[in-house]
Image: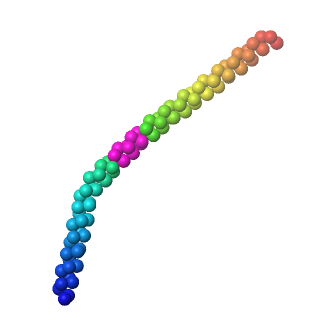
Amino acid sequence: MTNQCAHSSTGISKALFDLFCMQVEKELPETAALIRLSGLEMTDCMAEITGLGSDLSSGVRSTANMATMTEASVKQGVQSMQVCLCFLV
């Protein structure tokens, strides 16, 4: 009786294992394709973020340069006004 139980248990286990293997063979290619697609989308996203970061850095540099030029222009204007006031006095 024990041998018969062991054989039927082994038969069920093998059937379940075969069913599991068939399911894995069926779903694995689709799952792998979805993982690859997700990887490509993440790569595209990172490239986009990198590009936006570069654009942002460029904008900050341009703004800093403009602020420096504006400061220099204001200083030059103040100096010109001081020179003009000296001639008037």
Q: Is residue 36 above or below residue 88?
A: below
* Residue at 21 percent of width and 66 percent of height: 18
Q: Residue at x 23, y 63 (%)?
A: 21
What residue occupies the far right of the structure in this picture?
89
Magenta stretch in the rendered image: 37-47
59 left or right of 34 in image? right
Q: Quadrant of residue 24?
A: bottom left
Q: Position of residue 76 (x, y in %)?
A: 67, 19
Q: Is residue 19 magenta?
A: no
Where does the image place residue 29, in percent across and percent down from the top left?
A: 26, 52
Q: Picture coordinates of residue 47 (x, y %)?
A: 40, 39
> In the rendered view, does 27 fall on the left or right side of 59?
left
Secondary structure that dominates the magenta span: helix
Who's the residue at 75% across and 13% down the image? 84
Q: Judge left or right: residue 68 versus residue 57.
A: right
Colour setting: rainbow
Q: Is residue 17 left or right of residue 79?
A: left
Q: Is residue 9 above or below residue 83?
A: below
Q: Split into 4 quadrants, where in the image is the C terminus?
A: top right
Residue 19 lies, with reference to residue 81, above or below; the image says below
Q: Quadrant of residue 85?
A: top right
Residue 45 in magenta stretch = yes
Image quarter (top left, top right, bottom left or bottom right) of the N terminus: bottom left
